[in-house]
Image (spheres, grey):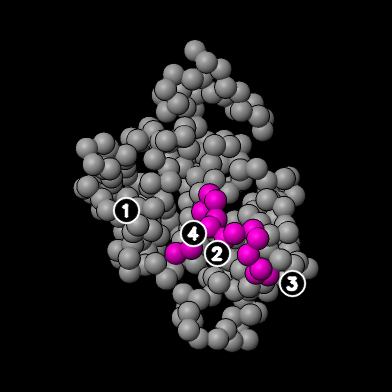
Amino acid sequence: MEPDIPPPALDLDEVTVAYGPALALENIDGMVAPGEAVALIGPNGAGKSTLIKAVLGLVPLASGRITVLGTTPARARRDVAYVPQADTLDPEFPISVGQVVLMGRYRRIGWLRRPKAADKEAARRALEQVGLADRARHRFGTLSGGQRQRVLLARAIAAEPRLLLLDEPFNGVDAVSEQALLDAIARLKEEGAAVVVSTHDLALAHLACEEVCLLNRRQYGFGPTNVTLTPDRLRATYGGHALELRGDRVIVAHS
């Protein structure tokens, strides 16, 4: 008897999003399995953030369907965590690192209920996973940009998501923070969570993800990283620029 194959964590079926008469995304298809990660790769304005917002149920679809964890984006929201490109937390606001991470538990416990010992322990473990357990009492605004990004990932980890969405998590982070983010993503995948990462860094896509979605308003490829990240497909995605991977470097040349 063959083992049961779990349903996809994310299923995109001809997803089209429009802002007025302008199409932001057109006919996007693909699936992400539990325990796997997909990189959304494309130029600025390609629709990567729009697709993430659609998966969150924050923008309506003009056509097509998105299924998240077997249901609609709105119904799945409790099991989905999101790390935005630029968080709305004011660095001057007097809130500690530990309090920021504890916010990840509120969707489970409710905003009006006090966190219990189990919630505080989940927040502590999440901070430990990103290497910042010793900063729990520090004010969030005193951390470096890379450390803040790690705290926001810890907030998402504390929510115990089955699907994690990250919008450009590696932008402007130092090498230590980059490795901590990669390690945390790998650990979440081992625990069965699916991950969607928007990134411009092709080398990091190779390190963190099994699949790639090449995106520039429409889809130029969706499949295994080593098959999909080809010079021809990247050139088409980026509108005629030639891109190559050489070791861990990305070479961009205007044609």
Residue at image point 21% right, 47% down = 63
Labels 2 and 3: the sequence-earlier one: 3
**Residue sitting at the far top:** 255
- Tell which of 224 and 186 is nearer to you: 186
Q: Which residue is mark 4?
A: 82
The answer to whether residue 119 is left or right of residue 235 is: right
Mark 2, other Cα within 10 Å: few <14 / some 14–19 / many ≥20: many
In three-dimensional space, the C-alpha distance between marks 1 and 4, rounded to whole angstroms, equals 15 Å
Label 4 sits on what residue type?
A: Tyr
Location of residue 187 by image quarter: bottom right
Quarter in which the N terminus is drawn? bottom left
In three-dimensional space, the C-alpha distance between marks 2 and 3, rounded to whole angstroms, equals 18 Å
Mark 4, other Cα within 10 Å: few <14 / some 14–19 / many ≥20: many
Magenta segment includes 130: no
In three-dimensional space, the C-alpha distance between marks 2 and 4, rounded to whole angstroms, equals 6 Å
Q: Is residue 70 above or below residue 212?
A: below
Pointer 2 with pointer 4, Cβ within 8 A:
yes
Mark drawn on residue 137: 3
